[in-house]
Amino acid sequence: MTDIRIPVDLLPADGRFGSGPSRIREAQLDELVARGRDVLGTSHRQAPVKQLVASVRAQLAELYALPDGYEVVLGNGGSTAFWDAAAFGLIETRAQVASFGEFGGKFAKAAAAPWLQAPDVRQAPGGEVALLEAAEGIDLYATPHNETSTGAMVTPKRVDVAGALTMVDATSSAGGTEATPSEWDVYYFAPQKNFGSDGGLWFALLSPAALERIERVAASGRYIPESLSLTQAVANSRKEQTLNTPAVATLSLLDSQLRWMLELGGLPAVSARTKASSDYLYAWAGERDWVTPFVQQPEYRSQVVATLDLVPEVDSAQLRTILRENGVVDIDPYRKLGRNQLRVGTFASVPTSDVERLAAAIDYVAERL
Ligand SMILES: *Cc1c(COP(=O)(O)O)cnc(C)c1O
């Protein structure tokens, strides 16, 4: 323990600023306890759990104002499992993949499956972005919306090529930024970031073209394991089910968060919240000579994950240790980036008032290092 004690009036009301898993609001936990008896430890093939799945699916469709024909599909295994499901069930021959950090890079690996042609990987170094671009022979274009490892964010845009799909990894952006369904065919995420839930499930908002592609690839005779089969996921989701047992607590936390988001005013409201918080941090950094936003171009700075580089005299690890001793946790940079950096999740559940106090707490510690 160091002896730096941050004054209570500078400490956030809740010290969790992780970029995933992230802060879960008290009300979500209360609701989980209250309805736990009806849904936890009961059959997921019976009405109570099916109603919970139905409620999550309906609220997601409402949050994104999904056009007719779009469907909300879910399955087990989080976004990582969805990458493999997409390699088996969505890419026909060859994908183009934007890779500008850890998560885009991981999908590029999944898209290099032996039954496909090697993906066309559009790469950019950490802190920058790579953009998708129409190219010959590509049937699926994939990009992260927000690259959680670096704090770089793009605006998802459809690559307008007849017959090709546009797919967006929205794991850390969904529920915290606006997104227009007409700009994508597949918008997928896991709920442990803005949705303040737990891990283990994936959700995909699918356009009619994506649903058609899933049918066609499955009918081609390609070997697809059952647990990664998107036709299974679509068929089960239509019955408010999953192929195998889902994480019901994760569904409950997500359901509560969706209701809260819709009551706040939906995507425009949550987006305004995350933007106010991250704008505050970028402006705060701009006023100090020892901290600078890692992403150079302001238009690509994430509104949900703010990455801030520190000068060598302010040691991130030491700063974070002291903050942790004072109850402020998880502002670590992505380990493989290896930078003297802070990374702050400014997700929907984090009020801007807590971000202001976080900045004040960092000032307090930095002045004393
Ligand atoms: C967190 C994250 C993932 C990984 O999600 P899992 O559910 O742990 O597989 C994938 N992509 C992005 C952009 C993420 O932020």
Image (tube, rainbow, N blue to C red):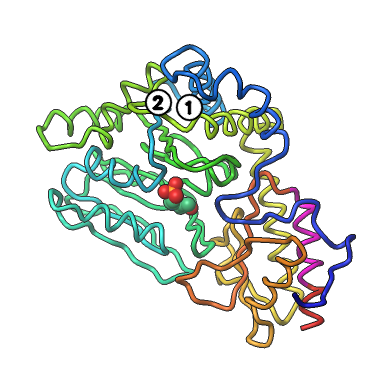
Q: Are marks 1 and 2 in contact (CB under 8 Å)?
A: yes
**Could you tell me how far apart the alpha carbons at marks 1 and 2 are, in whole angstroms?**
6 Å
Image-quadrant location for residue 39 = top right
Within 10 Å of the Cα at label 1, are there few (<14), some (14-19), or many (20+) other Cα atoms? some
In percent of width and height, residue 358 lies at: 76, 62
Q: Residue at x 40, y 21 (%)?
A: 241
Disc 2 secondary structure class:
loop
> Magenta segment: does it hold 193?
no
Name the residue furthest top.
47
Query: Which of the two residues, 218 or 329, is positioned nearer the viewer here?
Result: 329
Q: Main secondary structure of the magenta part?
A: helix
Q: Where is 350 relative to 322, above or below?
A: above
Q: Where is 342 relative to 241, above or below?
A: below
Image-quadrant location for residue 249 = top right
Quadrant position of the N terminus in the picture: bottom right
**Pointer 1: what residue?**
66
Is any atom of residue 299 visible in this view? yes
**Pointer 2: what residue?**
70
Amino acid tagged 1 = Leu
Is any atom of residue 145 visible in this view? no
Looking at the rendering, the stretch of residues picked out in magenta corresponds to 351-362
Amino acid tagged 2 = Tyr
In percent of width and height, residue 312 lies at: 63, 86
In percent of width and height, residue 120 lies at: 24, 59
Q: Is residue 277 left or right of residue 248?
A: right
Name the residue furthest bottom.
313
In percent of width and height, residue 212 lies at: 25, 27
